[in-house]
Image: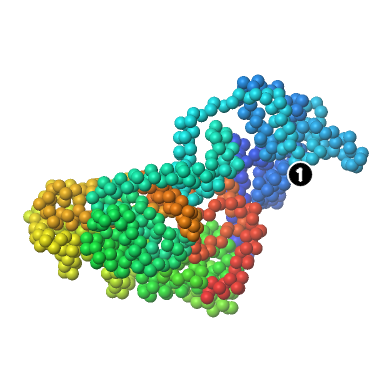
Amino acid sequence: MASANANSIDGSEDVAVKAVNKRFEGLLTVRTKAIKGKGAWYWSHLEPILIKNPETNLPKAVKLKCTLCDAAFSASNPSRTATEHFKRGSCPNFSPVLKPISQLPPLASPSSQQNHRKRSSESQQAAGASSSVYPVNMVDLSRFSTELSFSPTPIAQVPGLNQQPRMLSGGKEDLGALAQLEDSVKKLKSPKASPRPALSKDQVDSAFNFLADWLYESCGSVSFCSLEHPKFKAFLNQVGLPAVSRREFSSARLDSKFEEARMESETRIRDAVFFQVASDGWKGKSCTLGEESLVKFMVNLPNGMRVFQKAVYVGGGSVPSEYAEEVSWEIIRGICGNATQRCVGIVSDKYKAKALRNLEIQNHWMVNLSCQLQGFMSLIKDFCRELPLFRTVTDNCLKIAILYNSKSQIRNSFRKFRLQGVEFARFIRVPPSKCDISKNIGPFVAMLEDILSNSRVLHLVVSDDSYKAVCFEDPIAREVVDMIQDVGFWNDAEAAHALLKLITRMAEDIEAERPLVGQCLPLWEELRAKVKDWCSKYNFAEGPVEKIVEKRFKKNYHPAWSAAFILDPLYLVKDVSGKYLPPFKCLTHEQEKDVDKLITRLVSREESRIALMELMKWRSEGLDPLYAQAVQVKKRDPVTGKMKNANPQSSTLVWETCLKEFKSLGKVAVRLLFLHATSCGFKWNRSSMRWFCSQGHSRLGLERAQKLVFIAAHAKFERRDFSSEEEKDAELLGTMSGEDDMLNEVLADSSSIVNFPRICSMDSKPDSVISLVNLGTIRKKLFVAEEALFTPVYIQRVAV
């Protein structure tokens, strides 16, 4: 037993020594970079030192040594140490001093613009930071020493001066005023400084034109008031630009930019023979602010281009289907006037059963589709609501998460295993009590991922003696032990996570690739195959799962899926005779009837019989093999690595060129094959959405907001940039590294530092990026917050 205890002590000492050495090496790395000019100024005066145990001669702590006075300090927070020791006057040998005015170098001639700028820069730095200036010998405090009953503080000698420098009477706060005095003296000596070269009118106009583009494309993220910010004015003056008027940028210049973008969009729509309208935003997105109140209308053109049309503010909450139908029809009339047959159809994220259906009945030439992306996301909700697996996994995970987060004894066990090198999340993210998982799956996924990633440490904790003590008092703890040690629980949790991941990945591909209507049936067939493999892998009966999939399929299905699939040369199949024929064998009997009915509806009564005869000919003869192979040529996408169609518009072009003999059927084909199956267009920042919706109660404000949104959306489509700035910032912050990140890594290794708890709220994203901060400066506050966060009142609210 004694030898076992000795081995345990030796192991803990080794871990502590490694932690101290790692921390010391990290601080040395930071100091080395800083001395080379890539870090904070104070590292030239602070030096990390290693304190050793006199008995064992092993490192036991890391200190920071002041190279000026040899004082030693804790290494937990170098920045705060530097502030207190240097800037607040604790170090007797640190006294940044500045040359007296009488010893300033001769001023340069007025023609020397470079020296003038350099001196101005020095004056501004003197006004900003006391550590970068030197106090001048303006006041001799020794004259007042008898009256004030104290002696002046000794100051280190500065090379080049024969007398001891004195501090100013007002202390270091007088240094800014001293810098202003120096500037005034210099201006008096050289009153006529040479002006910088003035920009031409064309250069100024071009600069303001780029400024306006950036301001408008930010779409409310940057306020118009920022144009009159003092710092921004100083920047304009520094680069030789005159001041700008926010009134001009919010009125005349805005109107000009809007008219320019509107004319370009109208020209593209006018050049197209027909088009499709896409509306996104009707379906309220849970946990977002403002976006559910903004519906974006876009126009999809046959050549693959998209044009932004309008953003409609509809207020908060859901709106009646009649209103959606009315707004959609007004948009169509606004685009093409009385020539409404140019609009082939609408794709929308909501109102398929009512508004879109009614518009189809009233206008027989229209094909109105529901968004495929919303269909797949709704399927996830169907599984969470109808599949018993998700209810079981949710209940079990909640028990583990709440027990883990609420019991301090259990968290102490986790800390012990972390010292032994086991990685784990400090807290498990728990969905809020009012969060309906069937409507908002995000918090559930976050909790499930935390538990699966902590599976190893959870097994270690339930075997620990401290956890066994908790089991005597808490029956839920005993239930959690059985759960964690049960292989079935982990199989169910992994199965639920795998199914969600399967559908989510397909939804992400749909959002990125924006499939056409002819790809809908193959997409759902691919989903069925993947779900079947999932059932086989995790030993689940296929019947209940396939029933949920088929139910959602029927809700989203449109006859145009089958018709476009049959008419698209991309899916022609080579038979034994070498012909490339449409894949009628892949359709059910009902879907074959849908093809006939849809084609009959889309043509005039006189052409319906001819169109069906042409369909029979297409079924028996198909397409020339050479052109069929050319349409089906694929190439690898350099970004995703997936094989994609090399000629995306070739399906429509074949019908317009090689298949001219199919006059009636060809009209239907070219109007069907370009239709998009998704309504999602591009992403806005949440700040932009909130700003737009805040303008909804003012007519003038809403009109200005409409113009800004139009300009910004037009620019996004021009650049083919459909991501949001928030995603780009998250990616940037996730990959940034530097001195602060390295220092945080060093400090995080200390056992006295607390990582911030990761609790997923209802309006947070699991993949959101939180900026790194120096945790050493706030560790005490976090300890307090940790205890307050898991009070019995909070746990009771979460457990309800």
Residue at image x 59%, y 51%?
Answer: 773
Whether residue 264 sits left or right of residue 116 in the image: it is left
> What x and y, as percent, mark residue 114?
60, 25
Task: Give the quadrant of the N terminus.
Answer: bottom right
Mark 1, residues whose alpha carbon is within 10 Å: few (<14), some, or many (≥20)? few
Q: What residue do we see at 28% from left, 50% from top?
A: 301
Residue 398 picture location, percent across and down? 49, 71
Seen in the picture, residue 511 relative to 482 is either above or below; the reply is: above
Expressed as whole percent of the image width and height from the top left, the position of residue 536 reads 30, 68
Q: Identify which residue, 639 or 614, lies in the foreground.
A: 614
Q: Who's the residue at 63% across and 25% down the image?
A: 193
Instruction: Provide the secondary structure element on which disc 1 rests.
Output: loop
User: Residue 206: which quarter of the image?
Assistant: top left
For this rendering, which residue is in front, 415 or 17? 415
Q: Position of residue 687 (x, y in %)?
A: 49, 54
**Label 1 belongs to which residue?**
90
| Residue 327 horizontal side relative to residue 38, left or right | left
Q: Residue furthest right?
A: 146
Q: Amino acid at mark 1?
A: Ser
The picture quadrant where one finds residue 576 is bottom left
In the depicted view, which residue is nearer to us: 404 or 502?
A: 502
Residue 648: in sight, yes or no? Answer: no
Which residue of the protein is positioned furthest toward the left in this rendering? 577
| Residue 745 appears in the figure | yes
The front one of 35 and 797 is: 797
Q: Is residue 680 above or below residue 251?
A: below
